[in-house]
Image (tube, rainbow, N blue to C red):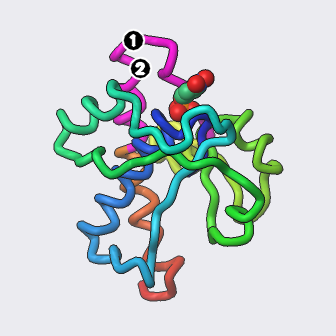
């Protein structure tokens, strides 16, 4: 999961997708591991933005273990799939490939959109991000058994 600061969008996607994967019984890190980072390094080591954390907490998730990390090319080598939150994030990690795409390419209601950056806006932006992230994470988990070779 890749965004700009790794304190708002990609951490929310990280926590929600990891939660869904665990609920589906696929949470063994030897099978599927979710990680996240930002293309900018300003917040490295920081916890999630308090607005992202409270939006997650209010919806029943635990945001407490997140610490921001910075993207480098090693992530392209180590991760099987990279999901960028917006077009700029996608460009900043080298653009599309068969393993690099927009997170919302898998959004079942509006595929191919971006996850808008809520950092400079109000609380509503975080609620909107959570809804996008929840339905897209459900679709990713639904696709995982086939991707892992066990339908
Ligand atoms: P994110 O949001 O990319 O969703 O984590 C941002 C967080 C911090 C900044 C920009 C966007 N920033 O400029 O510090």
For the point 35% across and 16% down, the residue is 124
Tag of residue 33:
none
Residue 129 is inside the magenta segment: yes
Image coordinates for residue 70, horizontal then vertical, percent:
63, 48
Q: Quadrant of residue 41?
A: top right
Q: Give the residue at the far front of this rendering.
A: 45
* Foreground residue among 63 and 86: 63
Left or right for 70, reference 93: left
Badge 2: residue crowd in 10 Å (few <14, some 14–19, many ≥20): some
For the point 36% across and 55% down, the residue is 138
Residue assigned mark 2: 125
For the point 44% across and 84% down, the residue is 30
Image coordinates for residue 58, horizontal then vertical, percent:
18, 33
Left or right for 30, reference 106: left
Image coordinates for residue 92, horizontal then vertical, percent:
78, 41
Left or right for 61, reference 26: left
Secondary structure of the residue carrying tag 2 is helix
3D distance between C-alphas at marks 1 and 2 = 6 Å
* Foreground residue among 46 and 23: 46
Image coordinates for residue 145, horizontal then vertical, percent:
43, 78
The magenta stretch spans which residues?
112-133
- In the image, residue 116 sits, relative to residue 31, either above or below, namely above
Badge 1: residue crowd in 10 Å (few <14, some 14–19, many ≥20): few
**Quarter occupied by the C terminus:** bottom left
Left or right for 106, reference 12: right
Q: Quadrant of ligand 1?
A: top right
Q: Give the residue at the far bottom of this rendering.
A: 150
Q: Quadrant of residue 57?
A: top left
Residue assigned mark 1: 122
Callouts 1 and 2 close, C-beta under 8 Å? yes
Residue 142 is inside the magenta segment: no
């Amino acid at each position: 999961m890749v965004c700009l600061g790794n304190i708002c969008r990609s951490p929310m996607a990280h926590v929600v997708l990891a939660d869904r994967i665990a609920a589906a019984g696929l949470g063994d890190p030897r099978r599927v591991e979710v990680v996240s980072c930002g293309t900018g390094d300003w917040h490295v080591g920081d916890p999630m933005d308090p607005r992202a954390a409270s939006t997650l907490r209010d919806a029943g998730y635990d945001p407490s273990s997140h610490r921001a990390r910075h993207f480098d090319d090693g992530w392209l080598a180590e991760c099987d799939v990279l999901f960028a939150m917006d077009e700029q994030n996608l460009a900043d990690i080298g653009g599309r490939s068969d393993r690099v795409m927009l997170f919302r390419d898998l959004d079942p209601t509006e595929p191919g959109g971006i996850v808008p950056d809520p950092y400079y806006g109000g609380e509503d932006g975080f609620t909107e991000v959570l809804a996008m992230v929840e339905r897209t994470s459900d679709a990713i988990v639904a696709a995982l058994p086939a991707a892992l070779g066990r339908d």
